[in-house]
Each structure stands twice: as structure tokens, then as C-alpha cells.
Amino acid sequence: MKGLFGIVGLLLSLAIVGILVKKQLASTQQIVPGLQLPAVTGAQGAASAPDGTVREQAQQVQQQVKQAVEAAMQKQRTEPDEK
């Protein structure tokens, strides 16, 4: 009889812990918003909403970064006067 209460108590506590773990894991899962590209003006024109797959979006971002780096490298720097 004592052993039966022990097993029932153990199963009951295990069920409570399982429910709490399930609730905790469910609360940590969040939907990740999609990639939003910054608005680009100038030579590329007005920005449009990102369409396509994640791969295409990643390629667009890589292209924009590459263009920004190339534009930054093309700017002439003024050298300070050396004495």
C-alpha cells in the first residue's frame, strides 16, 4: 500500500513537471519576421517590398553590401599635410 502511494505520487509529480515543461517550451517559440531590406534611394530608385525566397533576399543583401563597399572604396580621401 505504501509502495502504491509512492508510485502514484511519483507519476503525479512527473505529470506536473511534464506539463510545466511543455508550457515553458511553447512560450519560448516565436515566429521570426521575414527579412526587411532598408529603403534605397539614388541610382537604384525606390525600394520595393522584398519578394522571393530567402536565398534571393540573401543574394540581394550581398549585392547591396558589395555595391556599398565598392562605392566607399571609390571615394577619394584627402591626405593630411605632412610636416
Image (cartoon, grey):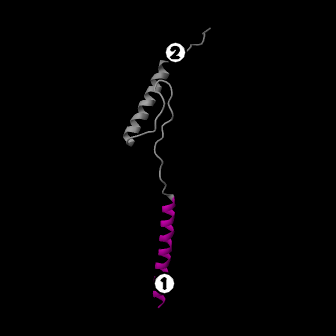
- The percent coordinates of residue 41 (x first, y second) are 51, 28
**Residue appearing at x 49%, y 81% in the figure:** 9
Instruction: Please identify the quadrant where the C terminus is shown.
Output: top right
- The first of marks 1 and 2 along the sequence is 1
Q: Secondary structure at mark 1?
A: helix
Q: Residue at x 41, y 30 (%)?
A: 63
Q: Residue furthest top?
A: 83
> What's the residue type where badge 1 is placed?
Gly
Q: Main secondary structure of the magenta part?
A: helix
* Image position of 77 with respect to 67: above or below: above
Q: Which corner quadrant of the image does residue 7 belong to?
A: bottom left
Expressed as whole percent of the image width and height from the top left, the position of residue 33 reads 48, 48
Give the amino acid type for the residue marked by disc 2 in the picture.
Gln
**Residues at discs 1 and 2 in contact (Cβ within 8 Å):** no
Label 2 neighbourhood size at 10 Å, few (<14), some (14-19), many (20+)? Answer: few
Residue 54 placed where, x, y %?
A: 39, 42
Q: Residue furthest right?
A: 83
Q: Which span of residues is magenta-colored? A: 1-27
Above/below status of 15 relative to 68 = below
Please name the residue shown 51% across and 60% down the image. 27
Label 1, on which residue? 6
Judge by depth and name the residue closer to the eye, 82 or 62: 62
Residue 73, given in percent of the width and then of the height, sits at 48, 20
Nearest to the eye among marks 1 and 2: give it: 2
Q: Is residue 80 magenta?
A: no
Question: Which residue lies most toward the bottom here?
Answer: 1
- How far apart in space, not on screen, are marks 1 and 2 (Cα)? 80 Å
**Residue 2 covered by magenta stretch:** yes
Which of the labelled discs sits on residue 55, or is there none? Answer: none
Q: How many marks?
A: 2
- The disc label shown at residue 76, or none: 2
- In front here: 37 or 72? 37
